[in-house]
């Protein structure tokens, strides 16, 4: 048989119990308030901040996403949906064989863990410093590809268009393709906090879009 528990010797009375529970509240009342004047004064985000995602482009405007769906498989919250499609010579959106025809991120589910950008083989997906993502309906927080694509910069051309003459998808991957202005490509900064490392080509052939 279970033994009956004896009354606790340190049990507080009916008045001391609630007072001790509000102890943290009473201490906070006498501290100097820390007021942030947001949105008039915005505090810079920390390095490596995980904000809104961005689908990056190559210097000539072609998309880096190859529609491999690895980001969707890596997402623990099932917040990413990708549909890949085949490129053609007359309609090319990215180097290589495939591109992301449909790309969705549900920010009602996203937990900002960054596993998706770690899984991306072409560094097509990165995270920006943008954290102001609000809406008055749930559908507005499901970002489609047009809201995730990086804006066109000088020297870029809106896809679809052919690759640079004489270049292969491997040249794009290694960053040796100039933009349409003739300038050498510059490495686009990201917010992962780590330097991009060159990935080895394990395909054994020229023109592998990813290892």
Image: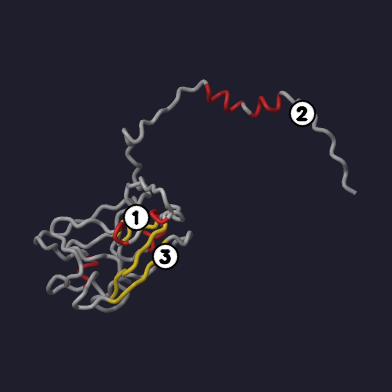
Where residue 160 sits, quadrant-wise, is: bottom left
**Distance Cα–Cα, label 2 vs label 3:** 54 Å
**Distance Cα–Cα, label 1 vs label 3:** 13 Å
Per the image, label 2 sits on a secondary structure element best described as loop
Find disc 1 in the rendering and name its residue: 53
Looking at the image, residue 41 lies above or below residue 210: above
x, y (%) of residue 181? 9, 60
Find disc 3 in the rendering and name its residue: 72
Whichever of callouts 2 and 3 sits on the residue coming sooner in the sequence is: 2
Looking at the image, residue 46 lies above or below residue 12: below
What residue sits 34% from the left and 41% below the top?
A: 45
**Distance Cα–Cα, label 2 vs label 1:** 54 Å
Q: Which mark is residue 66?
A: none
Find disc 2 in the rendering and name its residue: 10
Most extreme residue toward the front is 136
Q: Foreground residue, 122 or 129? A: 129
Per the image, label 3 sits on a secondary structure element best described as helix
Whichever of callouts 1 and 3 sits on the residue coming sooner in the sequence is: 1
- Using residue 86 as the reference point, say whether residue 133 is left or right of it: right
On-image quarter of the C terminus: bottom left
CB under 8 Å between callouts 2 and 3? no
What residue sits 46% from the left and 22% below the top?
A: 32
Whichever of callouts 2 and 1 sits on the residue coming sooner in the sequence is: 2
x, y (%) of residue 141? 40, 54
Looking at the image, residue 4 lies above or below residue 77: above
């Amino acid at each position: 048989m279970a033994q009956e528990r004896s009354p606790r010797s340190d049990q507080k009375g009916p008045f001391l119990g609630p007072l001790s529970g509000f102890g943290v509240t009473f201490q906070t009342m006498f501290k100097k308030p820390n007021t942030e004047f947001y949105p008039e004064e915005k505090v810079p985000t920390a390095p490596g901040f995980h904000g809104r995602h961005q689908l990056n482009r190559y210097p000539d405007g072609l998309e880096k996403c190859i529609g491999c769906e690895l980001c969707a498989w890596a997402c623990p919250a099932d917040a990413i949906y990708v549909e890949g499609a085949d490129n053609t010579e007359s309609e090319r959106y990215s180097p290589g064989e495939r591109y992301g025809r449909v790309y969705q991120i549900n920010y009602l589910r996203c937990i900002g863990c960054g596993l998706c950008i770690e899984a991306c083989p072409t560094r097509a997906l990165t995270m920006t410093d943008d954290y102001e993502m609000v809406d008055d309906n749930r559908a507005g927080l499901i970002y489609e590809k047009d809201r995730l694509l990086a804006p066109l910069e000088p020297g870029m051309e809106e896809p679809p268009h052919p690759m640079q003459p004489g270049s292969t998808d491997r040249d794009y991957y290694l960053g040796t393709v100039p933009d349409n202005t003739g300038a050498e490509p510059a490495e686009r900064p990201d917010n992962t906090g780590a330097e991009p490392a060159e990935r080895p080509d394990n395909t054994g052939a020229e023109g592998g879009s990813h290892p």
